[in-house]
Image (cartoon, helix red, strand yellow):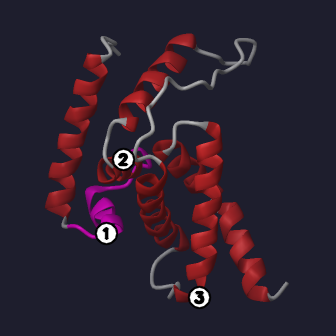
Amino acid sequence: MNPSEIEFLRLIDENKGILVKVSRMYMDDHDGRQDLYQEIVYQLWKSYGTFKRESKFSTWMYRVALNTAMVFLKKEKKHQIYDALDERHDAADEGYDADKDEQLKVFYQAVQELNAIEKALIFLFLEGQSHREIAENLGISEVNARVKLNRTKERIQQIIKKYNYEF
């Protein structure tokens, strides 16, 4: 392997949590998440030569991952019916909290009803990014990011109420 390939693999390994989270945010089934993860890595590799190092790798990775997820979602999920999440944690696992598991299940069900931009907003918010960082990653103004994020939070609350589930 050449040094560029080694560096790319190292950076992917260091930031793979971003890819896992984006995949989970945009796809509700295990196979879909794996396919999206692979597609994101492929797109990152394809565009790695264009990474100018003017920003952190993780910032660039967010942008590529979210754009890839939005395109992937449009292609793969146009007519899919969203079922309840089928992943369960083993009750014997240390630290298992059934209430928290149920809350996460309902949250991810609600997220599946959001459009691609709303999913990106919530994902970046959950990642702890500021309104300014969210705006930079999505290519919108900071004010627009703040307004869209607030509307998206309200929409998630409405969707969760539709499930008659209270946190």
Circle 1 or circle 3, nearest the eye: 3
Which residue is more in the foreground, 166 or 27?
Answer: 27
Q: Amino acid at mark 3?
A: Gly
Q: Secondary structure at mark 2?
A: helix
Q: Position of residue 148 (x, y in %)?
A: 19, 50
Which portion, as a residue range, is magenta? 125-140
The 10 Å Cα crowd at callout 1, few under 14, some 14 to 19, many 20 or more, is: some
Q: Residue at x 19, y 63 (%)?
A: 142
Label 3 SS: helix
Quarter occupied by the C terminus: top left
- Give the Cα separation between the discs numbered 1 and 3: 21 Å
Percent from the top left, x then y, of residue 122?
A: 35, 45
Q: Main secondary structure of the magenta part?
A: helix
- Residue highlighted by disc 3: 49
The reply to whether the magenta stretch includes residue 123 is no
Give the left or right position of residue 138, taking residue 142 as reference.
right
Where's residue 125, x and y in %? 36, 48
Q: Report how far apart the C-alphas of labels 3 and 2 lie in the structure.
A: 27 Å
Separation of residues labelled 1 and 2 (CA atoms): 16 Å
In the image, 116: left or right of 53? left
Labels 1 and 3: the sequence-earlier one: 3
Q: Which residue is mark 2?
A: 119
Q: Which residue is mark 1?
A: 136
What residue is drawn where x is 67% and y is 21%? 89
User: Which residue of the protein is positioned furthest toward the front in this rendering?
Assistant: 79
Q: Amino acid at mark 1?
A: Glu
Q: Specify whether residue 133 is painted magenta.
A: yes
**Picture layout, residue 35 above or below residue 139:** above
Q: Nearer the viewer, residue 38 or 139?
A: 38
CA neighbours of label 3 inside 10 A, class few (<14), some (14 to 19), many (20+)? few
Would residue 35 appear left or right of 124 to someone viewing this image?
right
Q: Residue at x 34, y 36 (%)?
A: 113
